[in-house]
Image (cartoon, grey):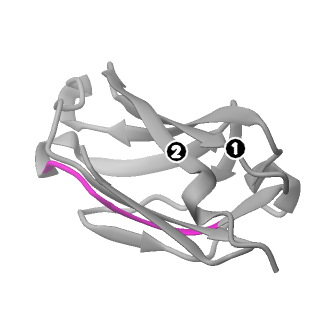
């Protein structure tokens, strides 16, 4: 099994309205699959409503308070969590803050787990 951890990059962090997004670049020669994540966010953001990857919902179970660890509850289409070699896809966390307030600019702590290679990418945002 190839170790692709060193070829993955996180970047392009932004907060827009009620959403936090981060770009994931797969510089490896193999397709990777998101298998789990950890996210800690500012409590005033409210609850985490859903997560999208490249415009497709991959998780929508809702989480009431930070932090959260997600290793299951994914949408049934496993292909939505895959990132092909040589591509960049955007992971978007959609919050539902009280009174339709915007998400805060930080702080955030994000950990992502991928297969193959059991990569663990961490970022304090």
Q: Residue at x 62, y 76 (%)?
A: 72
- Is the Cβ of the residue at disc 1 closer than 8 Å to that at disc 2? yes
**Number of residue marks:** 2
Q: Residue at x 87, y 54 (%)?
A: 79
Task: Please name the predominant secondary structure of the magenta segment in the image.
Answer: strand
- Residue 37 tag number: none
Q: What percent of the width, then of the height, locates residue 26?
A: 68, 45
In depth, the one of 71 and 95 nearer the eye is 71
Q: Residue at x 15, y 48 (%)?
A: 42
Q: Residue at x 14, y 51 (%)?
A: 43
In depth, the one of 96 and 104 nearer the eye is 104
Give the residue at mark 1.
Answer: 27
Q: What percent of the width, then of the height, locates residue 19?
A: 39, 30
Give the residue at mark 2.
Answer: 9
Asked if residue 94 is among those painted magenta in the image, a careful observer would answer: no
Outermost residue to the top: 16
Task: Tell me which segment is drawn in magenta.
Answer: 35-42
Quadrant for the N terminus in the image: bottom right
Label 2: element kind = strand
Structural crowding at the residue carrying mark 1, measured as other residues with C-alpha within 10 Å and reported as few (<14), some (14–19) or many (≥20): some
Residue 52 left/right relative to 29: left
Residue 61 left/right relative to 95: right
Quadrant for the C terminus in the image: top left
Structural crowding at the residue carrying mark 2, measured as other residues with C-alpha within 10 Å and reported as few (<14), some (14–19) or many (≥20): some
Question: How far is mark 1 from mark 2, CA to CA?
Answer: 8 Å
The answer to whether one can see residue 77 in this image is no
Q: What percent of the width, then of the height, locates residue 71?
A: 57, 77
Answer with mark 1 or mark 2, whichever residue precedes in sequence: 2
Label 1: element kind = loop
Asked if residue 36 is among those painted magenta in the image, a careful observer would answer: yes
> Which of the 4 quarters of the picture holds residue 5?
bottom right
């Amino acid at each position: 099994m190839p170790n692709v951890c060193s070829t993955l990059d996180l970047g392009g962090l932004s907060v827009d309205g009620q959403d936090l997004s981060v770009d994931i670049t797969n510089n490896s020669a193999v397709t990777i699959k998101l298998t789990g994540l950890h996210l800690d966010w500012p409590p005033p953001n409210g609850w985490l409503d859903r997560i999208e990857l490249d415009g497709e919902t991959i998780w929508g179970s809702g989480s009431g308070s930070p932090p959260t660890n997600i290793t299951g509850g994914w949408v049934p289409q496993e292909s939505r969590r895959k990132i092909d070699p040589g591509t960049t896809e955007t992971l978007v966390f959609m919050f539902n803050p009280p009174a339709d307030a915007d998400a805060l600019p930080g702080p955030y702590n994000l950990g992502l787990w991928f297969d193959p290679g059991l990569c663990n990418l961490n970022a304090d945002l």
